[in-house]
Each structure stands twice: as structure tokens, then as C-alpha cells.
Image (cartoon, rainbow, N blue to C red):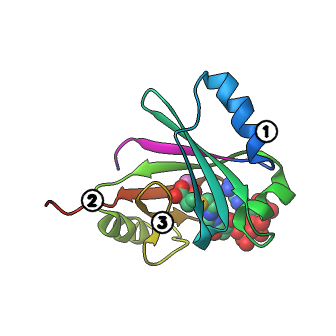
Amino acid sequence: MKNVEHIGIAVRDMEAAEKLFGSLFNTQPYKRETVESESVETSFFKINQTKIELLEATNPDSAIAKFLEKKGEGFHHIAFEVEDILSEMERLKKEGFVLLNETPKNGADNKLVCFLHPKGTNGVLIELCQEIKKPDL
Ligand SMILES: CC[C@@H](C(=O)O)C(=O)SCCNC(=O)CCNC(=O)[C@H](O)C(C)(C)COP(=O)(O)OP(=O)(O)OC[C@H]1O[C@@H](n2cnc3c(N)ncnc32)[C@H](O)[C@@H]1OP(=O)(O)O
Ligand SMILES: [Co+2]
């Protein structure tokens, strides 16, 4: 496992949250992206080496909508960059961690992602992400 890739924060109102975090960080988000498979709208800030991912639900059945209903806005997950997501998933499975997806799925910002169940990680939802490399031309 490498560095922290991003920190995910669940928000109810993306416009308002972008304004608030924009003022806090004194910078604008560098990217907005809808991830249909997760039913989320994302917005990314970069503060030096740190990435913050704001997440708004686009569908009442999404993980973010459920989270907001139960826990309210705030810290949602921490994502770690990995070199080889398949081997890391295999290693963590052998260690007894519960993977929430058995095959990597497409995340935001050009990543393959996998989540670990928070019940097995002291209540913290962990995301693994591997950059999708563009083929050399
Ligand atoms: C944009 C793509 C990607 C990226 O590229 O960065 C993302 O970040 S997508 C982010 C949104 N997607 C996900 O979170 C996918 C993984 N999550 C899940 O599969 C589910 O949310 C879950 C973790 C399995 C929970 O779902 P479910 O069991 O259906 O919901 P419950 O509400 O019943 O929760 C059960 C239990 O888990 C606790 N919980 C839920 N979310 C979190 C969380 N983020 N952090 C900590 N704990 C969480 C929830 O409180 C329940 O606990 P109890 O009430 O004590 O049972
Ligand atoms: Co994320």
C-alpha cells in the first residue's frame, strides 16, 4: 500500500459544499465527475499532495444517500493508492478483510477501486485505488 490517495466527504448540497471548501482551501475544485455505477457526483480539490473528494448522492439508493440518512454529512472514507489492486485484494482477503467488491470497479479520476467493509476495519470505510495507466504510444 502506498500513500493516501484521497479522503471522501459526504455532502448533501454539492454547490454549497464546493463554496465552503473552496473558501477553506483557498482554491477551486479541479474536477467534477459523475460516477453512474456508484450513483454519486464527485468534486475534487487538491491541496499540495492531498486530495479531497466531495460526494453527493444522485440516487436515493446510493451508498452516500444511505450514509447521509444514518450518519449525516462528514467523513465517509479514506482511499489508499496501490500499485497492483488485484494482488492487494488477494492479500487482504487472505488476511481476513471483507472486500465489498470481488473484482475492481471503475472509480472517479481514472482509477480502479475496491472497498473494504468498515465493520472489519474499526469502523472506517477503506478504498483501494490503482491508477489506470494509459498505454505507451
Ligand atoms: C466515486 C467512486 C469512488 C471513488 O472513485 O473514489 C468512491 O469513493 S464511491 C463512494 C461511495 N461508494 C461506496 O461507499 C461503496 C462502498 N460502500 C458500501 O458498499 C456500503 O456503503 C456499505 C459500507 C457496505 C454499507 O452499506 P449497507 O450495509 O447497505 O448500509 P447500512 O447503512 O446498513 O450500513 C451498514 C453498517 O455500516 C456502517 N457504514 C456505512 N457506511 C459507512 C462508512 N462510510 N463509514 C463507516 N461505517 C459505515 C453503517 O453505519 C452501518 O453500521 P451499523 O448501523 O452499526 O450497523
Ligand atoms: Co473515493
Residue type at numbered disc 1: Ala
Q: Earlier in the sequence, mark 1 or mark 2?
A: 1
In percent of width and height, residue 4 lies at 44, 42
Question: Which element type, helix, strand or loop, lies under badge 2?
Answer: loop
In percent of width and height, residue 35 lies at 58, 64
Which residue is painted at 58% across and 26% down in the image?
Answer: 27
Q: Which mark is residue 16?
A: 1
Disc 3 packing (10 Å; few <14; some 14–19; many ≥20): many
Seen as rendered, the residue at the extreme left is 137
Q: Which-is-in-front pick, marks 1 and 2?
A: 1
Which residue is painted at 77% across and 73% down in the image?
Answer: 61
Which residue is painted at 53% across and 70% down in the image?
Answer: 98
Q: Nearer the viewer, residue 94 or 10?
A: 10
Say whether residue 16 is visible.
yes
Disc 1 packing (10 Å; few <14; some 14–19; many ≥20): few
Disc 2 packing (10 Å; few <14; some 14–19; many ≥20): few
Q: Which-is-in-front pick, marks 3 and 1?
A: 1
> Considering only vertical position in the picture, is 94 above or below 26?
below
Question: Which element type, helix, strand or loop, lies under badge 3?
Answer: strand
Residue type at numbered disc 3: Cys
Measure the C-alpha gap from mark 1 to mark 2: 33 Å
Q: In the image, is the residue at mark 1 within 8 Å of ligand 1 by its beta carbon?
A: no
